[in-house]
Image: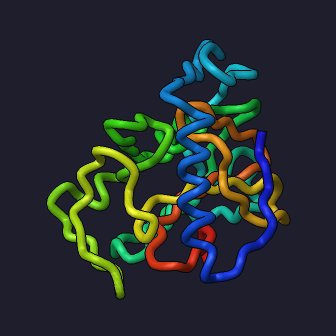
Amino acid sequence: MILTAPPVTAPTRTFAALGALVLLAALSGCATIDAGSGSGSGASAAATATAPAEADVSASECAGVNVVVDFGTLDADTVTDCVDATAAIAASAALTTTGITTEGSVEYGDAIVCRVNDRPAADETVVVDGQESFTETCASMPPAYAYWALWVKATPDADWDYAMEGLGTLEVEPGQSLGLVYTTGTETPTPGS
């Protein structure tokens, strides 16, 4: 289930983002989905995933699940790919199919995303203007001013919405988009913005 929240103003976005992270942890727990068998919490259909299509396919041309990963200030190229899917697929499987690796936290498991393709690295100092620099340990919740935000877009023409589930339970369907954005500061950019 994807819930939509009303737009928030820039000063309250940090609190909304933190609230979304806490909600993700509460809703998701540490459940996992076996995409191949359709078992696990929240699984509704067996997933069909094959090798990703060309990376330059736009969301409107993607018949499967469009995946966008924006590394923001982490200085890495944005990943855009189309995963061939004919039924609902676990979000984690969609990312894996595109070659994206994720890591959760010790405390919250895969209810949150701590690292994407090993970024921010365990020895990488994250610097955000106006905030205390830190090194991400993935022990618990990341700071509200530097975290991976998980997004879902219901159709190619829809707006991006925060995912209301973590990677452990979230499923996406053909025609939908899945996005991860490394979000810093008080702004909450959407994938590809």
The image position of residue 87, as x and y in percent, is 75, 30
Instruction: Say which residue appears at 83% left-offset and 63% top-offset.
Output: 158
- How is the protein colored in the picture? rainbow
Q: Is residue 140 above or below residue 87?
A: below
Quarter holding residue 128: bottom left
Instruction: Say which residue appears at 52% left-offset and 79% top-offset.
Output: 186
The image position of residue 163, as x and y in percent, is 66, 50
Q: Give the left or right position of residue 134, taking residue 191 as reference.
A: left
Instruction: Say which residue appears at 63% left-offset and 20% top-offset.
Output: 41
Quarter holding residue 56: bottom right
Q: Nearer the viewer, residue 124 or 53?
A: 124
**Number of marks present in the image shown:** 0
Q: Give the left or right position of residue 92, taking residue 63 as reference.
A: left
Residue 104 appears in view: yes
Assign the N terminus to one quadrant of the image: top right
Q: Is residue 54 above or below residue 103?
A: below
The image position of residue 89, as x and y in percent, is 66, 32
